Amino acid sequence: MTPYQKIVKAAGARADRVGKLDELPAPAMDDLAEFCAVAREAADRTLGLRPYDVQLLGTLALLDGKVAEMATGEGKTLSGAMAAAGHALQGKRVHVISVNDYLARRDAEWMGPFFEALGVSVGWIGQNSTPDERREAYAKDVTYGPVSEIGFDVLRDRLRTDASEIIVPAPEVALIDEADSVLVDEARVPLVMAGAADPGSAVPEMAALVRQLVRGYHYEIDEQARNVYLTPKGADSVENLLGVELYDEHEPSTLIELNLALHAHSLLARDVDYIVRDGKVQLINPSRGRVALLQRWPDGLQAAVEAKEALPPSEKGEILDSITVQGLIRRYPQICGMTGTAVAVSEQLGEFYGLKVAVIPPNRPCVRTDEPDRIYPTEPDKDAALVEEIQSVHESGRPILIGTLDVAESENLAKLLHRRGLEPVVLNAKNDAEEASIIARAGERDAITVSTQMAGRGTDIRLGQDVAELGGLYLIGSGRHASSRLDDQLRGRAGRQGDPGGSVFFVSMKDDLITQFVPDERPPAADADGLVRHRRGAYLVGHAQRVAEGVNLEIHRNTWRYTRLLEHQRELILEWRDKVLHGDAAAKALAEADPERWAELPEDTRDETARQIVLHAIDRCWTEHLAFLSDLREGIHLRALGRMSPVDEFHREAVAEYKSLLAEVERRSKESFEAPEPELKRPTATWTYLVQDNPFGTEWDRILKRVTAATRRG
């Protein structure tokens, strides 16, 4: 028996005594068995939910600072609420971090009576919360909020010039729902605070030009569809059309604009990577299949996609500050989380966050039937078989949930089903506002639900009347994802809490996963009925997935190699800024720098004047430092041609630049202090957004790959 199980058993022994109490006492956290007994009774009385033993095990793992792996439908929301209350009763401020507004509000309001019974206050924030609502929510013992909004609030606070305007309190405990999604899938995503708005610029002429280019003649795409490059004939054609030399080192802008337009045209697909809605390009989160609100690519690529779609360019501005999701989470002294698929990313959780995984057994054994993949030679073969399977199963009345890889695929499948006289409900990034209600009905008799891969995550699918006798929910995947974890999450939609269910994946040897990650492998032939049964087919699918997972892990590692130095420098600059904002550091520095000027200023205003001068200098120098590091990283990869380590070279130059930043802040502060009317202009407007990594790497990444490839060919 594990230590957690002993505590849960002891809690069970106290159930009768606690159940007879008229009023529940605030449990002391030095007796975890008593806490579990009281929390269980509180949940039963206020929510009508009596936690299972396994839910208490999950709670204990969260209180112990671990990531609890709990299967879909096992009651993670209640386990998380009990753990949040436990942390709060220890006097710690808790942020329950979710993946979207809907889940943050739903869980805070749903669990509200439970928290109240234990004397713990709770609040929530969302995208539309006002500053006053945010301040009120953060003042609670437990605050629910989406990771992006908490990050944006942190960024806004970093630019405050009045200490009384700060909204987010000092971080203490982060309890992360869907921990794999937040800590791994979105870890590299930078959250950005931008200012000094000016109209964006796009080059419609470039978008029109690249439409004339022919793949295989003017340009080529690499095997993993991550890079595109002009052929010599393509370069000649473009130079003739534009009347310029593309590779003139003194005029690189034309080549950059052309490459961005070419990438937007050939590598980013509408209804796969993004949708166009309300006259705007909206990115699709690749790990969830939902619209990524407030998310955009780096400015140049964003503008190129907008030009491709003949849309007005979105506003641009300089980055005032930014933080990656990983950097945001690592601010918290204590981190814990829960998800249905933690073991698969245990290496990353340990490497990047120092977290361990606790596997919580299901309350009832899973009886779902998981069939082997059905593998076909081509995508049309797969689609035809998929439609036949859906129609055949639907005739029995059994509900079917089909998980597709992208929006375009979901809509194409829906059209094929309509032609057969079937009426599927389609859930994708275009109607994500209806997500919870659509998914909640997916277990009803005769239901056919076509969904992008992770839509509805966090919403239970309950079986309708007589559905269990039909075999329960039938889950079909229309293809394997680049991560086996996403496949497991999709499978987990069926067979919750011991319900019957089934799952199967349809795969073709021409799916992107296969052609991108094992392009040189020759797939086996199909049998007479069209199915690929040779064991090498299943091996290739698994091998491609492992290669894809390895690539993504290496990208994560490489990103962190660059960003961890920046995060350290940010911590140092914020420590300095906090001393200025909350104390008399600015006054002391400027009084010492120019005693005569200090003596001239009115005594009642000079402290505040000094504070604003130094804050302005810090913020401007930091903004310029970020721009320098961005430019540095763009070109640092060329150092590899000289047999130098790009990461080491980046660190060397970044450290030297930071040292000069400190001296520059002092110089500018003194200069402004001595001016009759110091110029302390700040951006007239600011806005926040997330930057999805340029999926094709930096401009210099691509040039380096080209040079390397050319060298190999030569």
Image (cartoon, rainbow, N blue to C red):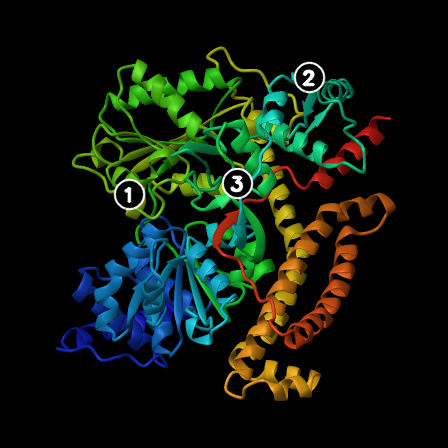
Instruction: Give the vertical position of 333 relative to 587 (above or below).
Output: above
Tell me if label 3 and label 2 are in contact, CB under 8 Å. Answer: no
Residue 641 shows in this picture: yes
Which residue is denoted by mark 1 in the rendering? 436
Query: On residue 547, which mark appears?
Result: none
For the residues marked 3 and 2, what is the alpha-carbon distance in whole angstroms? 30 Å
Comparing 344 with 86, the one in front is 86
Instruction: Give the vertical position of 297 relative to 520 (above or below).
Output: below
Sequence-wise, which precedes: disc 1 or disc 3?
1
Q: Residues within 10 Å of mark 1 (few under 14, many from 20)?
A: some
Query: On residue 483, which mark appears?
Result: 3
Which residue is denoted by mark 2 in the rendering? 216
Q: Residue 156: x percent and y percent?
A: 48, 62
Quarter of the rendering containing residue 415? top left
Residue at the image point whose x is 28% and y is 71% from the top: 121
Instruction: Give the vertical position of 534 relative to 92 (above or below).
Output: above
